[in-house]
């Protein structure tokens, strides 16, 4: 069994992230999310939290940064759970209204569901992204979110 405690993690603050925000988080901000930068509008950072049993990462978004529409495919089970741990942001499932996320908000994204998530225009935002285990899992990155729709967010 691997044990983790709930003490605050001391971290070096990545360049571009306000120290006050980074220090307010229970989880590290991590490194620039360069591998997925092409699927984000704005800058984001990624910190793996757990890679055993269930993959979990803390994703931090600068104000106004959102990811593109995407789908977490699975033939059985799968999907994604988002848990806001800092700041304010949004998640939206295709065909539904955006859900405002503040610390403690949990959003369940079923497998095979088109969605996006990211920071409010005026706030940093961090969430734990939990990859729900399933069969035949793959991710499909799609088009950017329409700028007119993003402009409606407060």
Image: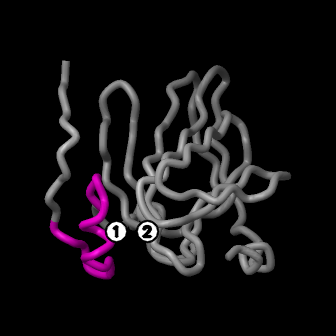
Q: Which residue is mark 2?
A: 44
Q: Which residue is mark 1?
A: 32
Q: Residue at position x 25%, y 76% from top?
A: 19
In this picture, is 39 found above or below 70? below
Would residue 83 be found to the left or right of residue 45 on screen? right
Label 1 close to label 2 by CB (< 8 Å): yes
Cα–Cα span, label 1 and label 2: 6 Å
In the image, the segment drawn in magenta is 12-29
Q: Residue at x 48, y 48 (%)?
A: 104
Residue at 21 percent across and 72 percent down: it is 13
Q: How many marks?
A: 2
- Residue plotted at (58% across, 57% down): 101
Task: Measuring from the top left, give residue 120's x and y in whole percent.
Answer: 58, 72
Label annotation for residue 115: none
**Is residue 43 part of the magenta span, yes or no?**
no
Is 73 positioned to the left or the right of 50 in the image?
right
Q: Secondary structure at mark 1?
A: strand
Q: Quadrant of the N terminus?
A: top left
Q: Is residue 86 above or below residue 20?
A: above
- For the stretch drawn in magenta, the main secondary structure is loop
Task: Judge the density around disc 1: few (<14), some (14-19), many (≥20) Cα neighbours within 10 Å.
Answer: some
Which quadrant of the view contains residue 118?
bottom right
């Amino acid at each position: 069994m691997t044990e983790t405690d709930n003490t605050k993690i001391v971290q070096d603050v990545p360049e571009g992230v306000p120290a006050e925000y980074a220090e307010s988080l229970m989880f590290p901000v991590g490194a620039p999310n360069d591998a997925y930068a092409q699927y984000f509008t704005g800058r984001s950072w990624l910190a793996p939290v757990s890679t055993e049993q269930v993959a979990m990462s803390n994703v931090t978004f600068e104000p106004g940064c959102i990811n593109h529409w995407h789908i977490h495919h699975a033939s059985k089970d799968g999907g994604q759970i988002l848990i806001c741990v800092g700041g304010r942001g949004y998640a939206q499932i295709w065909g539904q209204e955006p859900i405002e996320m503040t610390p403690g908000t949990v959003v369940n994204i079923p497998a095979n569901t088109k969605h996006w998530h990211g920071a409010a225009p005026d706030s940093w935002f961090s969430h734990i992204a939990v990859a729900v285990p399933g069969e035949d899992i793959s991710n499909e990155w799609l088009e950017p979110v329409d700028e007119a729709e993003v402009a409606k967010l407060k």
